[in-house]
Image (cartoon, helix red, strand yellow):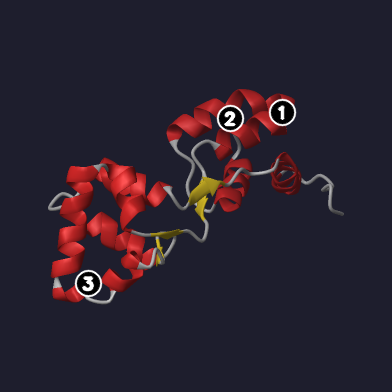
Amino acid sequence: MTPAQQAALESLVGRALTADEQAAIEPYLEARNDVAIAEVLSAGRVKPVPTDVGNGTILETIGLDAGNALLDVLNQAAEFRHVKPLLEQGRLRVDSALVRATLDGLVPAVLTAEQAQALKALAEHPDPIHYNAVSDVLNIAEGRLTLGG
């Protein structure tokens, strides 16, 4: 992988490529199997989508014991006093950056990392990278024409 190809792919995903990703992509570059490259880059990629939850969803997602422990903290701690009505109405947005950060902040005191992730996953949907986008950035990096122009 040339530095230009790597920079192009990193700009597409918005982060540095891992060593595993680089190793997985390398065999596909010579053949320019952009579909396979897009699959590698898309693995585990998700985006938050608007999702409201309430008490019941929390209990169903992480179980009765962990759910009750979390709800007890949220209902009793003064800093969460305005969260209680949202939970009762089923309107707490788990896609919110603030809620997601708060869930992470409750690990390990109230939640396990797995439980926090399970709650955040309620608002996550796959966010694959289309192979045309891979083709475009690699074509530009290699000095070729793009599909768009």
User: Mark 3 — residue?
Assistant: 80
Mark 2 and mark 3: Cα distance apart in space? 45 Å
Task: Rate crowding at label 3 as few (under 14), some (14 to 19) or many (20 or more) other CA atoms within 10 Å.
Answer: few
User: Mark 2 — residue?
Assistant: 25
Mark 2: amino acid = Ile
Q: Which structural element holds mark 2? A: helix
User: Mark 1 — residue?
Assistant: 33
Mark 3 and mark 1: Cα distance apart in space? 50 Å
Residue lying farthest right?
149
The C terminus - image quarter: bottom right
Q: In the rendered structure, are the residues bearing label 2 and label 1 in contact, judged by CB atoms less than 8 Å apart?
A: no
Picture residue at 28% right of the left edge, 41% below the top: 114
Mark 2 and mark 1: Cα distance apart in space? 9 Å
Which quadrant holds residue 70?
Answer: bottom left
Sequence-wise, which precedes: disc 2 or disc 3?
2
Position above or below: 21 against 78: above
Q: Which structural element holds mark 3? A: helix
The N terminus - image quarter: top right
Can residue 77 be seen in this snapshot? yes
Picture residue at 56% right of the left edge, 49% below the top: 13
In the displayed structure image, the side of residue 109 where residue 2 appears, left or right: right
